[in-house]
Image (cartoon, grey):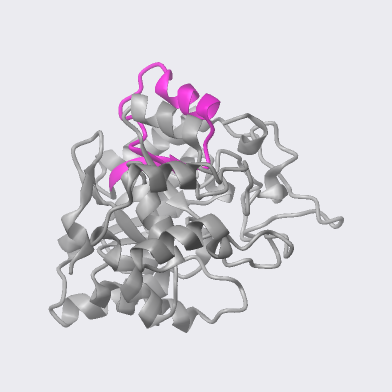
Amino acid sequence: MDSKHQRVKLSDGHFIPALGYGTYKPQEVPNSKTLEGTKLAIDAGFRHIDTAYAYQVEEEVGLAIKSKIAEGRVKREDIFLTSKLWCTCHRPEMVKPSLESSLRKLGLDYVDLYLIHYPVAMKPGEDLFPADEKGKTLLDTGDICATWEAMEKCKDAGLAKSIGVSNFNRRQLEMILNKPGLKYKPVCNQVECHLYLNQRKLLDFCKAKDIVLVAYCALGSQREKRWVDPSAPVLLEDPVLCAVAKKHQRSPAQVALRYQLQRGVVVLAQSFKEKEIKENVQVFEFQLTSEDMKNLDGQDRNFRYASADFLADDPKYPFSDEY
């Protein structure tokens, strides 16, 4: 069953598949896993693939897509591909070259969606995580509105069909929405969103502004030691989630994804295992009751797996605000 039958309309008229395949991977996982996983995802019916310059797997994602096009399984226009502008490339003159570099790695002429990865700018250069000798992140003074204008030019140039943001809070979204001379508003805001951080207020705000919320870490997280506290709760073992899953004879992951879809959230799922990838596309085959949704809503504890502490010293750090 193709996951592309459920799509969400973006404010610019394009459509984003409601379920996406995430390609972030922990450092210790070889890039070949991303190549294999992305191929398996396309075979299983995923048509929305989410990647980013910072994940350092754009080549593998591009190869997987090209191999599936060559097999005749999909056409380029069947695939909705997202990539992201990294924090070291926020200066307006760096935005288009950065997207062009991603496109070269992907081997594609355009991305369907290009996002500003974080609202915080870091020092430009080769280093993905520039830091001083004490390990403190080297930040850059950035003007998010100027970066956004450069994003708009990428859309005008046809390099990105749609443009949006990631990890922005309400205040930062409003800065762009209220910008004088705004040409295109962000079509989406991709944020961490799951049972323990259900983003209710941000979701309501985004819906009111016709901005689609896209959820990452929807299944918890891959618990990479660099970013996630090893004592963090394991989302897929949550007793309420597991009880709902048992009731519907579904996996906890399927219920965690279905929960987001029923809230009007576009949701990303990440796995390298064929069985799980196939399972994850089956989320359109069942429905949660309003009671299930209420019980799942009740699990919110404002808990964040990916707090991006490396950006916490910047006044533009997005997670200090309530939402």
Nearest the eye: 140 or 61 = 61
Q: From where the camera sits, is residue 191 visible?
A: no
Q: Residue furthest right?
A: 134
Q: Position of residue 82 (x, y in %)?
A: 35, 55
Q: Position of residue 230 (x, y in %)?
A: 72, 65
Residue at 56% over, 31% down: 323
Q: From where the camera sits, is residue 252 visible?
A: yes
Nearest the eye: 312 or 53 = 312
Residue at 69% over, 59% down: 232
Question: Residue 40 sits in which quadrant?
Answer: bottom left
In this picture, is 75 found above or below 137? below
In the image: residue 291, left or right of residue 242: left
Q: Position of residue 321 (x, y in %)?
A: 63, 29
Nearest the eye: 110 or 322 = 322
Q: Which residues are magenta?
A: 161-190
Image quarter of the N terminus: bottom left
Nearest the eye: 86 or 294 = 294
In this picture, is 39 found above or below 8? below
Magenta-drawn stretch contains 291: no
In this picture, is 250 found above or below 184? below
Magenta-drawn stretch contains 172: yes
Question: Residue 63 sits in which quadrant?
Answer: bottom left
* Number of residue marks: 0
Residue at 36% over, 44% down: 265
Residue at 16% over, 60% down: 77
Q: Position of residue 279 (x, y in %)?
A: 34, 72
